[in-house]
Image (tube, rainbow, N blue to C red):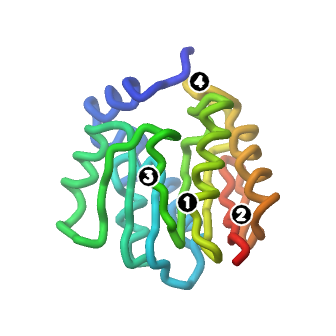
Amino acid sequence: MKPIDLDGFEKLFRASGDPWNYRSSRFEAIKRRHLIQACGSRKAGRALEVACANGETSRALLPHCLTLTAVDGAPTALAEARRLTNPNLRIQYRYAVLPQDTPRGPFDLIVVSEIAYYLSTRALNQLIKALEHALAPGGRIVILHHLVPFDDAARLPELAHGKMRQAFSRSMIKVFMKRCSRYEVVAFVRRK
């Protein structure tokens, strides 16, 4: 099967506002809870969520930050996120093609969930660098990805996630890690 691209994501969200059952899946709720736990107990000032999809994680993140910029490359997903989110000046949903449109920051919290395995090697390397530059000194970055291979990924999930984990380990301090049979979530803090 061919790896999915932005057009493929757009088609998925046109067919269903929740193609991965983020809203109703117990598994997704547990995974989101682990991601929020990895964000730490300190409320972040400015936060960024990369690949926000329909905004389920965005809405869970909002109590943990003062402002949130949530980006995605599928316009229909962003429209669904806006529709499901109460009008709120603290959250901004923005269209972004990654890595080139990665917001510059500085952000106190960056959440990267389930995107690494959809990117080419070059794009993943560029995204890692862009996120490192966008993170404020003392800021936290949280990465969460599936580890089990699936058909429309551009690369093996465990290798893609491992590449991000290894890159951030070189320049940051690991402060949280939870590995389950199907996914892993890791948090790093940038040195001040």
Farthest residue toward the top?
Answer: 1
Q: Residues within 10 Å of mark 3 (few under 14, many from 20)?
A: few
Label 4 – label 2 distance at C-alpha:
25 Å
Kindly identify which residue carries mark 2. 178
SS at circle 2: strand
Q: Is mark 3 in CB contact (under 8 Å) with mark 1? A: no
Looking at the image, residue 112 lies above or below residue 9: below
Q: Earlier in the sequence, mark 1 or mark 2?
A: 1
Amino acid type indicated by mark 3: Ser
| Horizontal arrangement in the rendering, residue 192 relative to residue 90 (left or right) | right
SS at circle 1: helix
Q: Position of residue 9 (x, y in %)?
A: 39, 31
Q: Earlier in the sequence, mark 3 or mark 1?
A: 3
Kindly identify which residue carries mark 4. 151
| Horizontal arrangement in the rendering, residue 138 relative to residue 70 (left or right) | right
- Mark 4 or 3: in front is 4
- Of residues 134 and 8, the one drawn nearer to the viewer in this rendering: 134
Label 1 – label 4 distance at C-alpha:
31 Å
Q: Residue at x 48, y 62 (%)?
A: 105
Q: Position of residue 145 (x, y in %)?
A: 62, 48
Kindly identify which residue carries mark 3. 25
Kindly identify which residue carries mark 1. 134
